[in-house]
Image (spheres, rainbow, N blue to C red):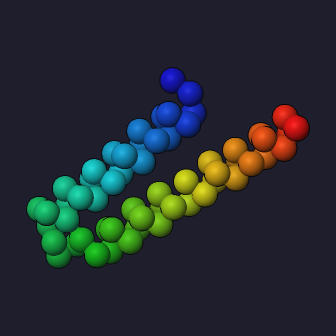
């Protein structure tokens, strides 16, 4: 499994955790959702940047 697919699996797991927690524990939902969404956004942005760098190196 490559880094991207492992990371995408991790992101899916985080988002699933967020959704399950929202249903079971609505009192902690907002803070947890913000933290997970922020983390996922940062990871996705890092992979997008990495892809751009790899494309430039190949060119």
Q: Quadrant of residue 21?
A: bottom left
Most extreme residue toward the top is 1
Q: Give whichever of 52, 2 is nearer the camera.
A: 52
**Depth order, front residue of 18/52:** 52
- Residue 52 x, y percent position in the rendering: 74, 48
Q: Nearer the viewer, residue 2 or 57?
A: 57
**Would you place residue 39 above or below residue 16 in this image?**
below
Name, please, the residue furthest toward the left.
24
Q: Which quadrant, please, contains the C terminus?
A: top right
Left or right: 39 as drawn, with respect to 24: right
Query: Residue 43, image x and y in percent?
Result: 55, 54
- Judged left or right of residue 44, residue 36 is left
Q: Position of residue 36 (x, y in %)?
A: 39, 62
The residue located at (47%, 66%) in the rendering is 38
- State how many labels appear: 0
Quadrant location of residue 10? top left
In the picture provided, is 49 more to the left or to the right than 18?
right
28 relative to 41, above or below:
below
Residue at the farthest front position: 59
Residue at 19% over, 56% down: 20
**Quarter occupied by residue 35:** bottom left
Percent x, y of residue 28: 22, 72
Q: Is residue 37 found left or right of 33 in the rendered image?
A: right
Q: Is 28 or 50 nearer to us in this picture? A: 50
What residue is rendered at 33% in x and 54% in y? 15
- Judge whether 10 appears above or below 30 on screen: above
> As displayed, is residue 57 above or below residue 34?
above
Tell me the residue at 32%/74% (across/down): 31
């Amino acid at each position: 499994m490559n880094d991207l697919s492992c990371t995408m699996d991790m992101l899916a797991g985080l988002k699933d955790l967020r959704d399950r927690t929202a249903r079971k524990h609505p009192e902690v939902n907002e803070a947890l959702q913000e933290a997970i969404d922020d983390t996922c956004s940062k990871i996705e942005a890092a992979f997008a940047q990495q892809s751009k760098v790899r494309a430039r190196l190949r060119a």
